[in-house]
Image: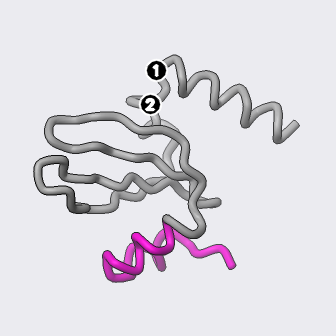
Amino acid sequence: MEIKVKEFSQLPLTDQINYVQTTGRYLHARLKGWCHISLYFMGTFYAEVWLLEHCGSIGMIRTFTSQEQLEPYLKTTSMDKLVQELLRENS
């Protein structure tokens, strides 16, 4: 069952984490300051899991539906390869 971004955002953080781990498709990761940010495709939206490196805990999960918010990931070579792979799968 696919969940909508609004429903997902209303879940407690622990439920969001479980849902991302069981349903999301891992796409890429990046570093920003002390955070390791993992990007997942959730079917109708994207979810970023922000892991605080210094304490090893998840600080937040950020969701978005806009392609523009993928910009930090699209600048990397590995993400470019992944996008090409996804395009081939969907054609």
Q: Is residue 76 above or below residue 87?
A: above
Label of residue 2 in the image: none
Q: How many marks?
A: 2
Q: Quadrant of the C terminus?
A: top right
- The N terminus is located in which quarter? bottom right
Q: Secondary structure at mark 2?
A: helix
Q: CA distance from mark 1 to mark 2?
A: 6 Å
Q: Which stretch did the figure color magenta?
A: 1-20
Residue furthest to the right: 91
- Foreground residue among 55 and 86: 55
Label 1 element class: loop
> Which residue sits at x=15%, y=41%?
34
Between residues 57 and 68, which one lies in front from this camera angle? 57
Q: Picture coordinates of residue 55 (x, y %)? A: 12, 56
Q: Residue at x 40, y 47 (%)?
A: 38
Q: Which mark is residue 73?
A: 2
The amino acid sitting under disc 2 is Tyr
Q: Are marks 1 and 2 in contact (CB under 8 Å)?
A: yes
Task: Residue at 76% x, 33% y: name it.
Answer: 87
Q: Main secondary structure of the magenta part?
A: helix
Magenta region includes residue 28 = no
Q: Is 17 inside the magenta-drawn segment?
A: yes
Q: Nearer the viewer, residue 5 or 37?
A: 37
Residue ID for mark 1: 76
* Residue plotted at (60% across, 67% down): 23
Q: Position of residue 72 (x, y in %)?
A: 38, 30
Q: What's the amino acid at mark 1?
A: Thr
Observer-nearest of 7 and 21 = 21
Rendered image quadrant of residue 60 = bottom left
